[in-house]
Image (cartoon, rainbow, N blue to C red):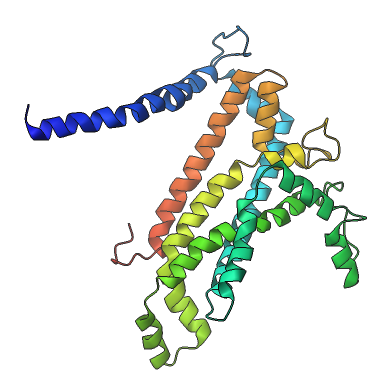
Amino acid sequence: MSLERKDALWGYVFVLPWIVGFLVFTFGPLLFSLYASFTNYDITSQMDWVGIRNYRNMFTHDSLFWKSLHNTLYYVLFNVPLTTFAALLLAVTMNQKIPGMRIFRTVFYLPSVLAGVAVFYLWMMLLNPSTGLVNMALGWVGIDGPAWMTDPNWTKPAVILMKLWGAGGGMLLYLAALQGVPEHLYEAAELDGASPIRRFWHVTVPMITPVIFFELVTNLIGAFQIFQEGYVMVQDQSTPGSPMNSLLFFNLHMFLKAFQSFQMGYATAMAWFLFIVVIVLTLINMALSKLWVHYEGGDNR
């Protein structure tokens, strides 16, 4: 056996555990869920073929499907641009050359490391209408704060506000991109008489558009997967998504269908619907990126 073939063989040997893991734990369950979406699978034993009935019932008989989809789209529509803007604003601010900036960068980044139920309970206390610090701070400037987590009109804005807490993760990526912009571009723009704002829009933004595009795509995918907030941040723990289903996000509704109603076939159909929606929006973003994303080599691909 030649040395080249031997190296290739050892390469396959080393990559074999990943291939087996992918086939067993990812690709296999993916195919099973696709088949299950066309059955009345109830987790126990029943798994009869029902064709597209699950998909038809999703659109015609499940009113909470549309409610959960509306809640999720509302969250995505406001969360993605706000978190993207907040992370970019933080990065620009943290990119200034002043003493002690490393400490400020650490302080703003740390909240993005924290996650889980403890953070949700912390924000439930902060957003408490009577004793929470948020309403107390609003009261100091003469604003009567809303009942964040009990008023259905304010629950989703409360979750969106909470999500800005983790903007430091995106800030780190933007900060790296900002520090990678060549200084001579700023010097040339300054010699041409460009103001700081024009230098930002015509030099900085075009140079960091690949990172902005990456953040938009990943934030979009992550926003569609929102689940824990609607399950945990409710006053009545026995009714996930309350009050009045205002926090019944798509993934939460799918979870309840699967593990509370044991309609696993219907839940997998919902999962595939969400998968198609995310794939379509991602492909649209990738197609539109050719119009505004600029790469250093000049080829928008």
The front one of 49 and 216 is 216
Which quarter of the rendering shows the C terminus?
Answer: bottom left
| Place of residue 37 in the rendered image (x, y in percent of width and height, measured from the top left) | 55, 21
Q: Is residue 55 left or right of residue 5?
A: right
Residue under the point 69% across and 39% down: 228
| Place of residue 210 in the rendered image (x, y in percent of width and height, measured from the top left) | 41, 61
On screen, 279 above or below 182? above
Q: Quadrant of residue 225?
A: top right
The front one of 98 and 79 is 98
Residue under the point 9% across and 34% down: 3
Q: Is residue 17 left or right of residue 42?
A: left
On screen, 108 above or below 22? below
The front one of 52 and 6 is 6
Which quarter of the rendering shows the N terminus?
Answer: top left
| Place of residue 145 in the rendered image (x, y in percent of width and height, measured from the top left) | 88, 61
- Does residue 250 appear anywhere in the picture? yes
Residue under the point 63% across and 9% down: 44
